[in-house]
Image (cartoon, rainbow, N blue to C red):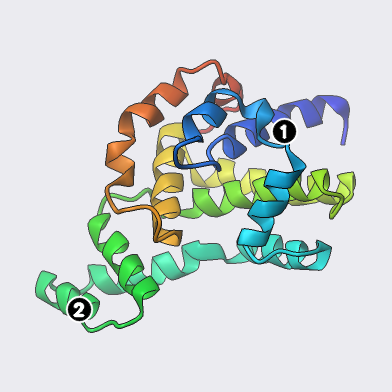
Amino acid sequence: MTTAAEKVMNDYVKAMTSLCIVGKFGDYFLHNPEMIFERRSILRGLLRFWNIENAEDLKQNIEWTIAEGARKEFAELYSRLSSVSEAERASIGQNTDDPTRKHRLSVVTQYLWRMPTFGIAAHDYSMAVYRACAGRKLGYLTEPEKWAYIEKVIPMVKGGFSSWKDYLFSFHVGAVFTSHLLNGDYVSENSVLLTKLLFSRNDSFRRATLG
């Protein structure tokens, strides 16, 4: 990859990975994306949280996330729930004992008919790029391996989303879907923060164009 091409790609990388730290420290990293990959101990802890202990685990995780990810399950649940009545949707959720599945059914129900065409794909795309960059920082990936993954993802992002606003919404619904630690109102509760992000000093969103 040429230096010029890498610079263009880096704008997408910065924009996409700045979303990946959610919770009470999210605002800091949204506005200081250069700090996301500074602390190896934090990166190692996050990978362990995702059950990634070594290079092989990481590669399998990234490849699955790019090829399928959580968006496949979201789309399957979305298709099922959107084809039945409100009463049937409630019954499906009530008859599920698995707390993870109950949570995910609830999230899909909450966002029926409100999602971009590609559902929660933005969450998969950002997390794949984030993990590739984190893996490079920790020595799990070589520089060419990191960029090979990124070069797979960026065209998927550009082909699937026409605006960063849609991308942000998709990402954050995906974050709620994949984590029971975030409640279903996370997106609406953080709408001001998400709007601020598009006008923050993190100008990667302006340089990396979509649509």
The reply to whether residue 196 is in sight is yes
Contact between marks 2 and 1 (CB within 8 A): the answer is no
User: Residue 128 at x, y = what percent?
Assistant: 65, 52
Q: Quadrant of residue 61?
A: bottom right
Q: Residue at x 32, y 53 (%)?
A: 183
Instruction: Tell which tag, 2 or 1, sits nearer the viewer.
Output: 2
Q: CA distance from mark 2 to mark 1?
A: 45 Å
- In what element is the residue under mark 1? helix
Q: Residue at x 61, y 60 (%)?
A: 49
**Is 84 left, or right, of 133 in this rendering?**
left
- Looking at marks 2 and 1 on the same chain, the residue that comes earlier in the sequence is marked by 1
Establish if 33 lies above or below 54: above
Observer-nearest residue: 161 or 17? Answer: 17
User: Residue 188 at x, y = what percent?
Assistant: 27, 40
Q: Which disc number belongs to residue 42? A: none
Q: Residue at x 73, y 46 (%)?
A: 41
Disc 2 marks a residue whose amino acid type is: Gln
The reply to whether residue 151 is in sight is no
**Is 152 left, or right, of 159 in this rendering?**
right
For mark 1, what is the residue? 9
Quadrant of image for the N terminus: top right
User: Residue 152 at x, y = what percent?
Assistant: 71, 51
For mark 2, what is the residue? 94
**Is 20 left, or right, of 96 in this rendering?**
right
- In what element is the residue under mark 2? helix
Observer-nearest residue: 131 or 124? Answer: 131
